[in-house]
């Protein structure tokens, strides 16, 4: 069933793999973990795993089946994220799907000029404001890697900007372990303390892991740190089929799944019951024709999400992206298709809305267009409410075959319910021509300017803003001292 934003009505959904296929991949993963093992590049993590019964040989760790089974039983089936004001905003389980931007694009497609350029911190701010304003966007990410701040600690500046310009949940990414600690510290200041943030987390860390069978030290440090604090995490090992794993979808997914399950085991060993989400993309062939890491490939769609559903764990998915370089037919098609597959497969927290050029460029125009397409997809896949009011048998009997339904009170009660979209052109040709033949691309650019001019995110109290900024200043001083040594 599809449950969007917690609606209880149901309709059909799609599973890329059935129970039998998932079971085979799971059993294969258990063999990889026990027979081949995974390289774990952190001594503390290896010690924790060894104490629990894993076999450690240098950096190679082999995990027994019983430990995996225990961790899967212990890991929560739900992940709840709140908004800054403590209200539940994301219920990441089942077929609830929530969408947001991505992080750290090296370029921006400027909506005012149509040109590709390097982003600034002001672009991170604009992206946060646009995401905060769009009704179909449920959480906020930084979108861009700003070049006008110290590149060694750019994530601290991103976090400060996001906290100041949205009340929606935040998914943050940090290049190092110290950045994760700084981000959590900022959130604890906003929440009023570590306990308050742990009880109602409004931000979570997306942990990039080298691959399914190589677990880098910083990812392990982040995993253990967040687990110790009882905070939710997004644990994301990704494989490139044919490059660092088998070219076949099944082999790529099985080896990627080894790293996924190792993260689940480690997090639960550190703190039983801490929430952890697993990947909802990759797990399939890499594009060996171009050797470019594409964001929208057909063969991988729904494969890791099927495994996440098999384990009944929250799934961190990807959608609303395109590998196109301009706002053309490919861009529109891939954005809609990736949104659709993420939704019908049931990915829970779906990021990278607005990404272009294989993740190297971001577009706020794509994001506001995706807002309309998401509204359409949610309406098109929503359950249909069937009751006395919606069947309207008395109205049909009253008006009969030739009655005028336009001015009936039943129509007046319900005519605002269908989805039509804000940017989608649904009028007649003459009216469209009279307005100067506007394109959706142009309407999206105008909508961005309207949002940036009129939407004012709820500000943080001045003392909280000051304390957050002190952390950024402290981090800048720290990195400057470190570089001088």
Image (spheres, rainbow, N blue to C red):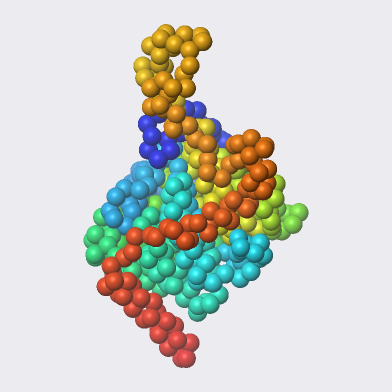
Rendered image quadrant of residue 461? bottom left
> In this orientation, which residue lies closer to the viewer: 143 or 305?
143
Is 191 left, or right, of 121 in this rendering?
Answer: left
Tally the numbered discs.
0
Q: Most extreme residue toward the bottom, as rendered?
A: 484
Q: Nearer the viewer, residue 425 or 258?
A: 425
371 or 191, which is in the foreground?
371
| Residue 93 horizontal/vertical position (percent) | 39, 42
Would residue 328 be seen by someone viewing this image from the given angle? yes
The residue under the point 44% across, 58% down is: 454
Left-right relation of 309 to 320: left
Residue at the image point whose x is 35% and y is 51% from the top? 81
Q: Is residue 341 above or below residue 245?
A: above
Which residue, as the protein is rendered here, is positioned at the far front?
434
Quadrant of residue 263 within the rendered picture: bottom left
Instruction: Give 366 or 419, whichever is nearer the viewer.
Output: 419
Task: Determine the residue positioned at 68% across, 43% down.
Answer: 433
- Residue furthest to the right in view is 289
Residue 345 rendering spot, x and y as whole percentages? 52, 38
- Is 331 positioned to the left or the right of 313 in the image? right
Image: 123 above or below 88:
below
Left or right of 173 on screen, residue 435: right
Asked if one can make out residue 204 in the rendered structure from this viewpoint, the answer is: no
Q: Residue at x 47, y 61 (%)?
A: 453
Q: Position of residue 218 (x, y in %)?
A: 46, 68
Give the x, y percent position of residue 214: 54, 61
Q: Quadrant of the N terminus?
A: top left
Position of 16 relative to 78 (above/below): above
């Amino acid at each position: 069933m599809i449950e969007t934003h917690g609606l209880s009505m149901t309709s059909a959904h799609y599973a890329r793999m059935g129970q039998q296929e998932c079971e085979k991949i799971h059993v294969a993963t258990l063999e990889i973990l026990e027979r081949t093992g995974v390289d774990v590049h952190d001594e503390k993590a290896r010690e924790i795993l060894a104490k629990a019964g894993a076999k450690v040989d240098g950096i190679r760790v082999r995990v027994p089946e019983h430990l995996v089974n225990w961790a899967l039983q212990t890991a929560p089936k739900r992940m709840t994220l709140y908004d800054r004001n403590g209200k539940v905003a994301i219920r990441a389980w089942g077929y609830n799907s929530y969408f947001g931007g991505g992080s750290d694009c090296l370029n921006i497609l400027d909506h005012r000029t149509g040109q590709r350029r390097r982003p600034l911190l002001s672009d991170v701010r604009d992206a946060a404001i646009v995401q905060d304003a769009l009704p179909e966007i449920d959480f906020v990410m930084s979108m861009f890697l700003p070049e006008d701040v110290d590149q060694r600690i750019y994530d601290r500046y991103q976090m400060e900007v996001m906290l100041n310009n949205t009340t929606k949940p935040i998914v943050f990414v940090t290049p190092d372990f110290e950045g994760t600690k700084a981000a959590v510290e900022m959130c604890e200041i906003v929440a009023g303390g570590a306990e308050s943030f742990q009880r109602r987390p409004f931000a979570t860390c997306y942990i990039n892991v080298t691959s399914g069978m190589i677990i880098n030290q910083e990812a392990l440090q982040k995993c253990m740190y967040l687990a110790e604090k009882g905070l939710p995490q997004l644990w994301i090992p990704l494989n490139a089929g044919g490059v660092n794993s088998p070219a076949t979808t099944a082999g790529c997914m099985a080896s990627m799944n080894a790293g996924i399950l190792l993260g689940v085991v480690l997090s639960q060993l550190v703190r039983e019951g801490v929430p952890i989400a697993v990947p909802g993309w990759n797990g399939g062939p890499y594009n060996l024709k171009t050797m470019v890491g594409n964001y929208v490939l057909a063969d991988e769609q729904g494969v890791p999400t099927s495994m996440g559903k098999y384990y009944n764990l929250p799934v961190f998915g990807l959608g609303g992206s395109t590998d196109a370089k301009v706002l053309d037919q490919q861009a529109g098609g891939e954005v809609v298709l990736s949104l659709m597959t993420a939704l019908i497969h049931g990915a829970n927290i779906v990021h990278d809305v607005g990404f272009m050029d294989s993740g190297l460029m971001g577009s706020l125009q794509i994001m506001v267009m995706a807002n309309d397409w998401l509204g359409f997809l949610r309406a098109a896949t929503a359950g249909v409410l069937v009751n006395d009011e919606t069947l309207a048998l008395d109205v049909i009997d009253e008006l009969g075959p030739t009655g005028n339904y336009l001015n009936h009170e039943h129509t007046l009660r319900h005519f605002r319910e269908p989805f039509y979209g804000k940017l989608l052109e649904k009028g007649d040709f003459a009216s469209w021509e009279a307005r100067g033949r506007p394109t959706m691309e142009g309407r999206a650019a105008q909508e961005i300017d309207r949002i940036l001019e009129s939407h004012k995110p709820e500000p943080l109290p001045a003392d909280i803003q000051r304390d957050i900024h002190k952390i950024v200043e402290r981090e800048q001083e720290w990195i400057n001292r470190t570089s001088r040594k």
